[in-house]
Image: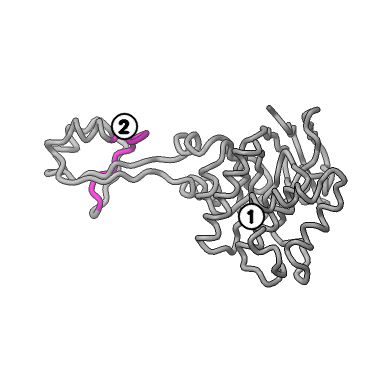
Amino acid sequence: MKLIEVSNLTKKYGNFTALDNLSMDIYAGQLTAFLGTNGAGKSTTINLLTGIQQPTSGKIDYNESYSKDIGIVFQNSILDNKLTVWQNLATRAYMYKHITIQDLENLMSQTGVNQFSHKRYGDLSGGMKRKVDITRALINHPTLIFLDEPTTGLDAQSRIEIWQLLKELQQTKNLAIFLTTHYLEEAEYADNIYILQKGQLIAHGSANTLKKTYGEQLLWVVPSTNSSFLNTLEFKNYQIDKYKGIGIPVQNYDEAILLLNKYHNQILDFSFQPITLSEVFIQLTKEV
């Protein structure tokens, strides 16, 4: 189910265009990753979609069954460092008349923050704070949660724990997640990826689609004799590296295996180098 349909969305600040003619869709239960370099328009888009700012032009259509109850996790926390985790979350829950204490306790148990609910928010580690921030954003039972670089500055273990939590919430609550991140490996989980450059959408698709469209995976082989191998090789757009050998572009692992079987009598060694989303992103956003 489509939750939000964005059409030709533009935001200008004077003569500066922060977002230029963006069109995109957000679906229930899906993870949408919104990627771009600093200043690409990611935070501006979140501000527009959540109603914090109004667009200069364009349209945002919400599904009729979409309650507009959304959750937002900002880059910087809005919780009180001097209050305990319980006090912070109970204060937020009090703002929603339909949320009971039992509802809050159940949510805190699911996200794991009940284990340190007695501690002051300001005394928590970065990973613990992020879990509390996410819990705060889920209090009103949102259909969609916006996460603006939720794991920035966290250690590797905390990032893993945050993503385990998000995946569980997505599966158990059919939660739609709109994510901005500088950690490109996190976007690998996304159902849809949008890449922005200077306010303009330059690519869209799943991680696999983007890799196939914009990336190049290489099968590196070390032949017994370069010249004879190249004479029999059907591919012309190969690469040569004095350390890796000859790089042959392939679509996937299966194609690499077929090539290895075909030329196995001429190959001494090989390695397969799959393209990463980070490499695709760098290629798309590099300055010409």
Cβ–Cβ under 8 Å for marks 1 and 2:
no
On residue 149, the disc is 1
Magenta stretch: residue 248 in it? yes
- Badge 1: residue crowd in 10 Å (few <14, some 14–19, many ≥20): some
Residue matched to label 2:
254
Q: Inspect the magenta stretch and tell me whether residue 93 lies in it.
A: no
Residue type of the residue flagged with mark 1:
Glu
- The percent position of residue 165, horizontal first and vertical second, equals 59, 49
Residue 242 visible in the current orientation: yes
Q: Secondary structure at mark 2?
A: helix
What separation in Å lies between label 1 and label 2 (alpha carbons)? 35 Å
Q: Residue at x 32, y 37 (%)?
A: 237
Q: Quadrant of the N terminus?
A: top right
Helix, strand or loop status at disc 1: loop
Q: How far across and down, in percent of the image, does residue 183 sit?
A: 54, 54
In this view, the residue in front, 267 or 166, is 166
Which residue is painted at 75% across and 42% down in the image? 141
Mark sitting on residue 265: none
Above or below for 122 versus 272: below
- Packing grade of label 2 (10 A; few <14, some 14-19, many >=20) is few
Q: Is residue 98 left or right of residue 3?
A: right
Magenta stretch, residue numbers: 244-256
Horizontally, residue 242 falls left or right of residue 162, namely left
In which quarter of the view is residue 272 placed? top left
Looking at numbered disc 2 in the image, what kind of residue is underneath it?
Asp
Taking 171 as reference, is 94 left or right? right
* x, y percent for residue 44: 74, 49
**Which color scheme did the rendering employ for the protein?**
one colour
Q: Quadrant of residue 26?
A: top right
Q: Earlier in the sequence, mark 1 or mark 2?
A: 1
